[in-house]
Image (tube, coloured by chain):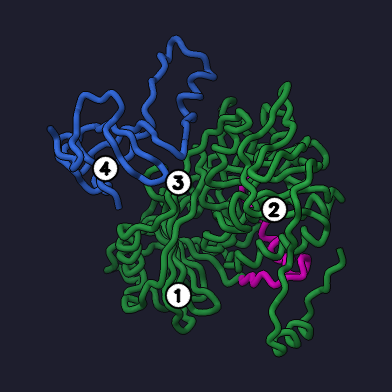
Amino acid sequence: MARARYSALGLLGHGLSQRRWSRVWRDHDLEPSYDVVIIGAGVHGLATAYYLAANHGITNVAVLDSSYLGGGGSGRNTAIVRSNYLTPEGVRFYDRSVKLYENLAAELNFNVMFSQHGHLTLAHDDGSLRTMRWRAEVNKLEGIDSEIIGRDEIQRLVPFMDVSAEARYPILGALYHPPGGTIRHDAVNWGYARAADALGVQIHQNTEVLGIDVQDGRVRGVRTNRGDVAAPVVVNCTAGWSSLVAALAGVRLPISTHPLQAAVTEPVKVFLNTVVVSGTLHVYVSQTARGELVFGASTDPYPSYSMRGSLEFTEELAGHILELMPSIARVRVLRQWAGLCDMTPDFSPIMGITPVEGFMLDVGWGTYGFKAGPVAGETMAELVATGKTPEMIASFDLARFAEGRLVGEKGAAAVGH
Amino acid sequence: MFRIPCPHCGPRNRTEFRHIGERGSRPDPRATTPEEWRGYLYGQRNASDWTAETWYHVAGCRKFVTMDRHTLTNEIRPAAGSTATVTDDGTPR
């Protein structure tokens, strides 16, 4: 379907006219069969659908979501994008994602508001500093802009931060990653949805998968609250609920679902130009273009599917962030929320094939799924289209847990470690 | 925040406890297969439902406490078949 492309002039004209903006993807009746069914209409599911259509010409694709588009982790994360991971596999993978994000607005004809204003990870002790040196060296070998900086440089980048030796947790240095930054996560979801829809992909919201049909070790289709759908390929892109969905196909995943909470303050004049992360203090903060401070922390320390915020989280978060930036003590928190993270034992994702032929996984994304959305979609689309596992995701297979080939990313993937 | 009825200390804040994990049996390392052992290491139900769990009352009596918790609502009830009875308000009987 041809759809009008957005242009600066067109947007200005439409804005001035005060007319309503039309929806950028369509609703459909559920058809009895598709070539590919993708479960989960978040950034991973939508990106997989988009790249299937755009790179491989496979357009008879349905993306099913039990709720609304981008309502899970894709709309609840803190929108940070970076590639300064610890393992070479991780670094290469996330770097490809950053590259895709850099060109995404032009490719999708949708402004995703990617702002590469830099990413700082603070070290408060020798152990963290040592891991960061290691990370910086791995990053540089892979061609990623990443370096250790001292207190003077940190103070220059973030003048409001307390870098004094008198702080409770004095800052010893930081890993500085200039290409890191933030993006408008809803725009990424909507942009992929619009582009996939324009190529013929069908997006079905409020369509819950109740069962997955498996016969003779092959997937045959899915059963939903809107009827049954036959499909030779079913891709699980469901984040927090991934182990429940995989269990429908009889596949057991080594996943534990934890809530991750975040909070946002009232908008204030822009003063924070980089993303600041402190593993020791279990907190990260960035400022949006509108001026709100966005905070995140580590996952709740017990598994749960509850998405209710808790006062203990806000209290701890405030205490920690004020250790770093005492001057924001009067800024008020507007709201807080939680998303669900499917944590794996090694803090790396699970991607690729399963013992059930045709049933594929793009799960286990824990606390770092959003930044990997584009590259996960690109590689999963390649896997579905060619039947061959791309080199880049080969080490993230499900079999690694049985074969003892874990890809330990905890030192760079998690805030609380 | 939810409270956990400790059979020894009564209802206490969740932050006093450390989550240990789903209850299950540990296979004998000398008699198990690698598949079974990995299932024990990495496998959990991770259900969105009532789950039998062990918590450690780290900032209290430092005893291990078993209970059933609903992972969607964080409601807690005494472990099924438990002999350590807990009354409705969580006080030990």
**CA separation, marks 3 and 2?**
23 Å
**CA separation, marks 2 and 1?**
44 Å
Q: What is the secondary structure assignment of the residue under circle 3? A: loop
Residue that numbered label 3 is attached to: A305
Residue that numbered label 4 is attached to: B17
How far across and down, in percent of the image, does residue A241 sit? 54, 43
Q: Which amino acid does label 1 sit on?
A: Val
Instruction: Give the drawing colour for chain A.
Output: green
Q: Is residue A108 magenta?
A: yes
- Residue A358 visible? The answer is yes
Contact, mark 2 vs mark 1 (Cβ under 8 Å): no
* Residue B13 in the figure: left or right of residue A328: left
Q: Residue at 56% of width from left, 34% of height from top?
A: A406
Q: Residue at 55% of width from left, 48% of height from top?
A: A86
The verdict on a common chain for dots 2 and 1 is: yes
Q: Residue at 59% of width from left, 25% of height from top?
A: A403
Which class describes the residues within 10 Å of circle 2: few (<14), some (14-19), or many (20+)? Answer: many
**CA separation, marks 4 and 2?**
42 Å
**CA separation, marks 3 and 4?**
19 Å
Q: What is the secondary structure assignment of the residue under circle 2? A: strand
Of all chains, the one bearing label 1 is A
Residue that numbered label 2 is attached to: A204
> How many badges with numbers are in the image?
4
Q: Residue furthest left?
A: B93
Question: Which chain is blue in the rendering?
Answer: B
Q: What residue type is labelled 2?
A: His
Q: Quadrant of the N terminus of chain A?
A: bottom right
Residue that numbered label 1 is attached to: A158
Q: What is the secondary structure assignment of the residue under circle 4? A: loop
How far across and down, in percent of the image, does residue A134 sit? 52, 50
Query: Picture quarter containing residue A145?
Result: bottom right
